[in-house]
């Protein structure tokens, strides 16, 4: 059989198998647009909790700062392998890593600058404990995002008209979220606020599916315990 002139054998590969830079760029920003809202919400949650815990000073690291850094890193990763980048999980993983490294860097910088500042009296321990729930509640309103009926399905939640009791329940949930390990909190919020599938959640947290299931069970139990201690009752699980 005579080979046709100027024909490129298929096993040598052609540009058809790899998108052009322009196609890759368009594909990346289409992908980013689908998941940008979830990414921003996750970043804001993380920054708010870091601030309430004292790991970050309000304003020194913003959601825009984090998302910009994630976009820069994600672009190179997407162009290198666009077929594997289909869920928001990898963007969340990049954001978590960036926030972790920036929080450590900024905290170290503050420590280095301490000797240049005047000593400021610390908040009395009693006052710090008494205001913890209010600070957490200020940074995050669980009822706006977290699907509490999925976390504690048998909870007898107050009616929306009872604003005082609803606020107290939000405070109890917020304290539970603040006091649990960061991975537990991220798993709970990504699953029940952002709606990530278990496979996406495992990728976002860098854990196996079985580890994620165990963490979710522990996080749900912690929320249940906290709201029970706050005096809320439980009934039959809704059908």
Image: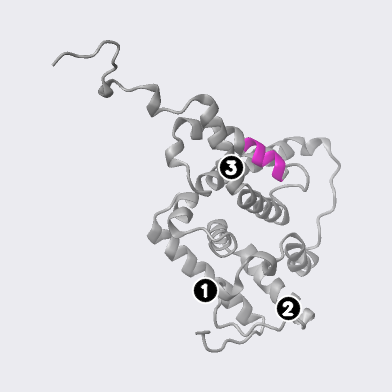
State if disc 2 and disc 1 touch (CB < 8 Å): no
Q: Residue at x 65, y 71 (%)?
A: 173
| Residue position marked by numbered label 3 in the rendering | 32
Location of residue 122 in the rendering, given as x and y in whole percent from the top left corner:
81, 55
Q: Nearer the viewer, residue 165 or 239?
A: 239
Q: Which residues are magenta?
A: 63-69
Name the element at disc 2: helix
* Cα distance between the residues tagged 2 and 3: 35 Å
| Residue position marked by numbered label 1 in the rendering | 221
Q: Residue at x 60, y 38 (%)?
A: 70
Q: Quadrant of residue 123?
A: bottom right
Which of disc 3 and disc 2 is earlier in sequence? Answer: 3
Name the element at disc 1: helix
* Cα distance between the residues tagged 1 and 2: 20 Å
Of labels 3 and 1, the one closer to you = 3
| Residue position marked by numbered label 2 in the rendering | 166
Q: Residue furthest top?
A: 5
Location of residue 16 in the rendering, given as x and y in whole percent from the top left corner:
39, 26
């Amino acid at each position: 059989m005579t080979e046709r002139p100027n024909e490129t054998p298929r096993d040598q590969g052609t540009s058809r198998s790899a998108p052009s830079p322009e196609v890759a760029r368009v594909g990346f920003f289409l992908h980013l647009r689908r998941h940008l809202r979830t990414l921003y919400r996750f970043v804001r949650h993380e920054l708010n909790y870091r601030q309430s815990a004292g790991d970050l000073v309000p304003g020194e690291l913003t959601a825009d700062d984090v998302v910009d850094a994630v976009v820069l890193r994600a672009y190179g990763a997407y162009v290198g392998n666009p077929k594997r980048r289909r869920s928001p999980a990898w963007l969340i993983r990049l954001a978590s890593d960036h926030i972790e490294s920036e929080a450590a860097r900024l905290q170290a910088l503050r420590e280095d600058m301490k000797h240049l500042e005047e000593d400021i009296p610390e908040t009395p321990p009693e006052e710090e404990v008494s205001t913890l729930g209010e600070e957490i509640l200020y940074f995050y309103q669980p009822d706006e995002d977290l699907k509490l009926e999925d976390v504690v399905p048998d909870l007898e939640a107050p009616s929306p008209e009872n604003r005082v009791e609803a606020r107290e329940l939000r405070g109890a949930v917020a304290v539970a979220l603040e006091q649990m390990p960061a991975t537990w909190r991220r798993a709970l919020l990504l699953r029940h606020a952002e709606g990530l599938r278990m496979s996406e959640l495992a990728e976002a947290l860098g854990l196996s599916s079985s580890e994620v299931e165990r963490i979710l069970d522990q996080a749900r139990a912690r929320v249940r315990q906290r709201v029970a201690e706050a005096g809320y009752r439980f009934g039959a699980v809704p059908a």
